[in-house]
Amino acid sequence: MKPGSLLTIFFLLFSLFSHAGTKVYDHPPIQVTVFNEKKEPLDFVSVRILQKADSTRVFSTVSDSTGNLALPDLKPGDYLLCVSRVDYEPACQDLIISATNTNTAPRILTIILHASRQLSTVTVTAKKPPVQFLSDRTVIRVDASINNAGTTALEVLERSPGITLDKDGNISLKGRDQVLVMIDNKPSYLTGPELNALLQGMSSNDIETIELIDNPPARYDAAGNGGIINIRLKKNRQRGFNGNLSLSGAQGIYPKSNNALSLNYYSGKVNLYANYSMTINQNLLDMYAFRSYYADDDKTLLSTLEQPTFIQSTGKNHTLRTGLDYTLNKKTSLGIALAGTKIDRTGTGRGEASWKSVNSQPDSLIRTSNSNSTDWKNASVNVNLRHQFSGKQELTADLDWLGYQIEGGQGFQNIRSDNNPYTESFLGELPSKIRILSFKADHQLQLPKQYKLETGVKWAATSTNNKAAYTINKGGGWEEDLGKSNQFLYDEQIRAAYASLERKINRWWYQVGLRYEHTSYDAHQLGNTVIKDSAFSNQYGSLFPSLQASVELDSLNELSLTMNKRIDRPPYQRLNPFVFIINKYTYQKGNPLMKPQFTYTVELSHRYKNLLSTSISYSDTRDYFSQIFLSDSTGTFYYSEGNLGRRKILGLSVSFSEQLLPFWNFSSQVDLQHKKLKGFVWKPLEASITQVSISINNLIKLGKGWAMEASGFWISRSQADIQELVEPTGQVGIGFSKQVLKNKGSLKLTARDIFYTQDMEGFTIFNQATEYFRLQRDTRVINLAFTWRFGKQTKATPRRMNKVDEADRVSG
């Protein structure tokens, strides 16, 4: 589908929905907004409509991320409107639908939920399904899954529905890579190995929920053609002083440990919190590669290279988060959040490079050894403001500063001991400094006739300083390796503004948005006597329209349509043209000629109750990012990244979640994608594949505080890059939990990848060469975790309201 056609459909639908607003209703539509005591919207609140006479359930749903929802058409009668959320006291109120009401103006109900005073109510999270499929996103409740105990954020993501990881840890959502990862609604500004290190160092104990947003609206950054992964960290909302202690120890081939302590004090106007986590993980990478080199005809075999490699690594992570939220008055609140992370990672490896002739006769054998280290420091500061001008108008603002200081080191030694012996050694120092400053402001205004207008601006500035200093020793002493050394400076600014208009009309709802982003950057590679000094800069701007629309076909069925345009900018690390050593015959290098890729996406989905969701989607990416695998005359392979031609993906997704029996919660998602890839590397290349991913989760209550979980995922043969094909992989996990200490604590015993099937195996084509590879990590792990909630315990009872905290308002 051409971009012009996409925009044409976009505006036609907008016109159609706008004219639909003239309909006269049998009774006024009802809009519900749920707030906490500080007048902050509460996301994902459970809402039920019950018959007042016998409490029979008529309708149930969940509010969106802003605490809003629209009730369906109800027959005239007396009902109960009941709302509930974890850590809050449930509330119910009378709801009367009159058959004689001639007022067609919408009714807006505002409900205030009060924080729970009973510590044991935290255990309600065990009753929530681990996975919840909503109309605009999928919500992963981390604590609700037994098998998430003692894991990292990256391990939670890899077993989440719709998510796949490649051999380098890059994340894809429903077959589309370049996913934007956010933490508490703020971009991490990291990609590739840096993002991988951050997620591997983040404890699952610190995470409350993970939101998977396939098609984000205009208020989100336009980056990420694969969508957004928003990691929401825990923040205790109970009054008084409370805390949570989590301890875990695990054993795979190597031991692991994951521990966390969170403290919170909340009293009306003041909410003070502090969280500390520590992880110590030992891991392995058992890698095998077999390369075949061919003559110019790509058929005649010339030689082969066999490379077994074993790497053992140890990572230690310390993370501290603290903050203060202060309510100045009923309309205004201020907050400050501080965070710091320190990651120390060391590794050693050994391997061989065995050359053989076309007749499989040994030619040469090179033994290799390597060591690497990473000292990662990260600090961040956030200052935020929320002000409610009235019940219909709100302003929020955030000022963020982030800093990363990364000290990396590499060491390699290659020894050949045949008729042509030699020894060569490399040392590399790879320091990196990243500084990010950003400001954003968002304004919401409730307009007459159930319109809601959202507007906002954002500015972000990024500065990086990467250095690579290599030395080489070929037996005559150490000397600078100026061919691999460089220093790369990069400065980028992004300015953005957006507006979106939302309306709920009886059974129809739509939101149209338009976002503009302008990017400018300057890059400078400092030269030396071997490499010339070079500099390049660029600037570009673009509009990003979005459309979300839905219609309630009846009380059980909903149909939705989303359309958007998104951008992915080249990661600034990938623009650096320096060379990174992987082993003697494998290098990685950047590409300063990369340009942004643009993706156009349309998705049609159907939801039956809150049980079954089905969607079909189509995306078209121009100048798409892909790994590029090059080779030279010495048999050395170079991994790089660049823009190729076009990538088209036709996708089908089916998700199901239901309490099949009173003791059994089941959820599953199946994603099917048909991909077509086209591009030019050393010659025109094309690839086409149909791939499937399946995830299943079973949560079973066994009684007397016991529960068990069985879960797993499987990914068929898949392809993310035009030159590389990956074989099927997957894993199965099982876990048991027991509530202890009067339901204030829990013990969890889990086993992950019990059949040891989560390896990575594939095939790569190069110019006049091919490579078969296999990677195996320490994924089969047994974990024992203990969690204890402590603090003041007071009695709480459900609140029954005869009137909402703020009276119903009629919008004029």
Image (cartoon, grey):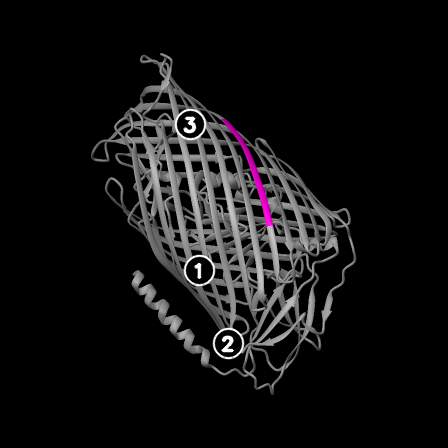
- Whether 392 is drawn above or below 429: the answer is below
Mark 2 lies on residue: 449
Earlier residue among tags 3 and 1 = 1
CA gap, disc 3 and disc 1: 48 Å
**Disc 3 marks which amino acid?**
Pro
Mark 1 lies on residue: 218
Residue 308 circle label = 3
Magenta part of the chain = 336-347
- Residue at 29 percent across and 46 percent down: it is 644
Instruction: Single out the mark in the foreground, 3 or 1.
Output: 1
Q: Can residue 691 be seen in this view?
A: yes
Callout 2: SS:
helix
Q: Are marks 1 and 2 in contact (CB under 8 Å)?
A: no
CA gap, disc 1 and disc 2: 22 Å
Residue 355 circle label = none
**Disc 2 marks which amino acid?**
Lys
- Residue at 59 percent across and 61 percent down: it is 41
